[in-house]
Image: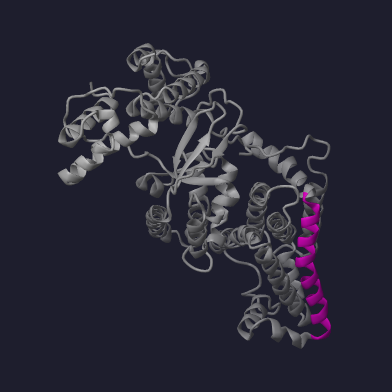
Amino acid sequence: MPAPPVAGHGGGAQVAASPMLDTYREVLTPEGVALHLPAAGPVPRALAWLIDLMLRVGVLMVMSMVLGVLGGFGQGLYLVGMFLVFWAYPIVLEAAWNGQTPGKRALGLRVLASDGAPVGWLPAVVRNLMRTVDMLPFGYATGLVACLCDRHSRRLGDLVADTVVVHVAPRRIDPSLPPATPQAPGQSLLPDEQAAIVAFGERAPRLSAGRQAELAALLYPLTGTAGSEGVRRLYGMANWLLGRR
Amino acid sequence: MKQEQFVLRHQAEWEAFELWLHAHVDGPRRKPGAASIGRNGGLDDGQVPARYRRLCQQLALARRRGYSTPLLERLQELMQRGHAVLYRAPPPRWRRAAEFLVAGFPQLVRSQAGCMWASLALFAVPLVGLFVLLQFRPELVHQLLDPQQIAQIEAMYDPSDARHALGRDSGTDWQMFGHYVMNNISIGLRTFAGGLLAGVGTILVLIANGVNIGAVAGHLQAIGHGDPFWRFVAGHAPLELTAIVIAGGAGLRLGLGLVAPGRRRRRDSLVHAGRIGARLCMGVAVMLLLAAFVEAFWSSTQSIPAWGKYTVSAVMWLGVIGWLWRGGHGAAVDEGDDAS
């Protein structure tokens, strides 16, 4: 792929400490903005691994059928192919194909360097060679324990290679809100206040009318009214905040 | 500035950037500069870094001013896609790989001399010790190998049995080549990875291999099957044994990174040792590939007289040692090609 001029590599990147109990990882880039990296937990990763396993077994079966007719020569090629499928498959795919094996692509996962940059060849080699240890004593038990202990669900291979597996598409927030005339809030709101109002708009329809009114009453200083009218105004503000004017 | 004005002012810029990303990453791959300006939305590859930094600034501004979530999300997504393109590792180059094999790898091995000597000792002491011991106490072999194994190696290198002696048809040569690639390179790579268990895995593999090879060689020598055995192993031993020792050294370095991180944080020290180990492993894999080739197609040829085999072996030993000792000598130390 063509390589446009590359800015200094990761030197200024740093990880912001997040107070939340979330696997969400924020990395500050040298440009001073934060990358949002939702780290992937053990379950989607195990599923991706299973898909890859089936694919690899499938490739080996096809190879054994084709090469079986070639006798000893075919057998030799088959064993070389087995070596490649076993060792080179994850390394080459992760390094050359945007950090994704087919299984990871199917599950929407991607391997990244811990500073949020695409994974390079050496880290890809390290994290996949270390599978040998993560597999011990059986079925990736060591990797699972490491994954559950680490804040960003990294197995030992990820820790040594300094990589992290993330969900590719962060959940797209395209919330469906109850229809209401968009209405500007009377005062400017901080980002988390905005988020709270939008979240109210998303979730309130699932609550009882009494509970909706009770929550909306908390924002009496903002809406200036209580009861179902207050709820409607909050819906209006949520719509306005999402740019529906 | 109101959000509407902000969007109105920069909208075109974002769309151009998005188009470029689309043409560049999602579209068919092409050579740098080959993409026509029109299809890239008017953005030239050279302008992209500056545009990306502007986008970052606009995102930060939008965030600070508390603009609406959809706008922030859109800018965030553009920024992350741009980041992924601009910060990716350079693609590997064949020339670089060749340079690494000729110069970088021997340099790297020498720079880890301590671990390499330790690895050599862990491997060679049991090997040579057992070999010598079995010349005086041949019955001890039964403590080390099980009877089946002993019967198998005795039959394999029986000098009186013409059928089994070394020569094979070419089909089997290829088969054995595949077997050696799968088996030996896997062992080499696992020897390195075992280092993550504070070096214990590597140490065990090295000693076990030393014991096994020492026992086999000692036993065959003691019962007078030495000649076919030495003729067989002489060819590939220089590459194979050295490669195992280097893989062991890489594993010990990794274990050392965990146990004695020195002035780094333990994690950083592990990451550093991992990078060194990965580069060593690439060289080890190439060495073992060559060894597999020699083992499958040269070691098994029976027609070559003993002196021919031993001469070739001597030349290869000299070559390997000379390469590791002098390779890349005086050249600039290459600190990690695509280090991150």
The extreme bottom residue here reads: B139
- Give the camera-side residue of B121 and B31: B121
**Position of B330 compared to B8: left or right?**
right
Q: Quadrant of residue B75?
A: top left
**Position of B92 compared to A61: left or right?**
right
**Main secondary structure type of the part rendered in magenta:** helix
In the displayed structure, B75 sits above or below B273; it is: above
Q: Quadrant of residue B311?
A: bottom right
Residue at position x 26%, y 30% from top?
A: A238
Is residue A155 at least partly visible in the picture? yes
Which quadrant is home to the N terminus of chain B?
top left
- Residue A204 included in the magenta stretch of the image: no
- Residue B113 included in the magenta stretch of the image: yes
- Give the camera-side residue of B218 and B196: B196
Is residue A77 at least partly visible in the picture? no
Colour treatment of the image: one colour
In the displayed structure, A170 sits above or below B240; it is: above
In the displayed structure, B26 sits above or below B131; it is: above
**Position of B26 compared to B272: left or right?**
left
Q: Which residues lie in the magenta part?
A: B112-137
- Give the camera-side residue of B300 and B187: B187
Disc tally is 0
Q: What x and y, as percent, mark residue A201?
A: 24, 36
Q: What x and y, as percent, mark residue B105?
A: 72, 45
**Position of B15 compared to A7: left or right?**
left
- Give the camera-side residue of A76 and A53: A53
Which quadrant is home to the C terminus of chain B?
top right
Q: What x and y, as percent, mark residue A212?
A: 20, 42
